[in-house]
């Protein structure tokens, strides 16, 4: 879920290998922690070994001890992907990340934090929900609600008159 600009600003010293996290600087100069799995850890370690620092530069992605420009970095990734035979769209990776994490059951508020968004609406704009996912989520929520609700055969809930029910609902807003 890292933005290209965040990846380019990653520092080697900001990697916590034990916790499998890296601190990145996002929009508005905000720091956030990004998690990675064991497979990525292995790949990242191999990358660092094969790309040593130059002139003590701490940047994870560097060219001759300097930060890559956005255009240069994306061009290198695009060329690499084309050699592998697939189309590269870096920003699409954030959409794919968001969608896959939601499919796997990640709470939207956690995803929002991982992606560095201040507004949950922005995060959910990255998620492509398929009709089957909506149906499954509805059925699961419906079953959970049935388990939590009082048994209608043993308990009666009274709202009084229609006006009292309306007034009660209005007061809850």
Image: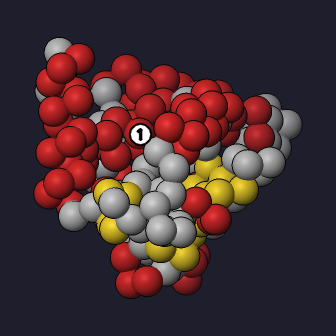
Disc 1 marks which residue?
97
Which of 103/14 is in front? 14
Q: Where is residue 15 drawn, in percent x and y?
A: 65, 57
Q: Where is residue 110 drawn, in percent x and y?
A: 59, 55
Q: Quadrant of residue 133?
A: top left
Q: Quadrant of residue 100?
A: top left
Q: Where is residue 72 drawn, in percent x and y?
A: 17, 54
Q: Residues within 10 Å of mark 1 (few under 14, many from 20)?
A: some
| Residue 128 position (above or below residue 136) | below
Which of 119/63 is in front? 63
Q: Secondary structure at mark 1?
A: helix
Q: Where is residue 73 drawn, in percent x and y?
A: 24, 52
Q: Is residue 40 visible?
A: no
Q: Image check: 39 left or right of 108?
A: right
Q: Image check: 46 left or right of 98?
A: right
- Residue at left 23%, top 17%? 84
Q: Image check: 156 left or right of 78?
A: right
Q: Image check: 98 left or right of 89?
A: right
Query: As drawn, which residue projects farthest toward the top?
Result: 85
- Residue at left 47%, top 45%? 51
Which of 108/160 is in front? 108
Count of numbered circles in the view: 1
- Residue at left 58%, top 60%? 12
């Amino acid at each position: 879920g890292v933005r290209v600009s965040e990846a380019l600003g990653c520092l080697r010293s900001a990697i916590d290998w034990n916790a499998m996290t890296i601190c990145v600087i996002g929009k508005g100069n905000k720091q956030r922690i990004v998690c990675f799995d064991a497979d990525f850890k292995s790949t990242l370690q191999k990358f660092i070994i094969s790309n040593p620092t130059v002139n003590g530069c701490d940047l994870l992605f560097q060219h001759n001890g300097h930060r890559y420009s956005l255009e240069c970095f994306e061009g290198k990734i695009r060329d690499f992907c084309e050699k592998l035979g697939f189309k590269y769209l870096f920003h699409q990776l954030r959409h794919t990340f968001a969608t896959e994490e939601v499919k796997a059951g990640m709470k939207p508020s956690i995803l929002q934090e991982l992606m560095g968004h201040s507004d949950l609406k922005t995060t959910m704009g990255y998620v492509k929900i398929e009709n089957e996912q909506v149906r499954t989520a509805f059925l699961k929520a419906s079953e959970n609600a049935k388990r939590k609700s009082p048994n209608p055969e043993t308990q009666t809930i009274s709202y009084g008159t229609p006006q009292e029910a309306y007034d009660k609902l209005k007061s809850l807003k």
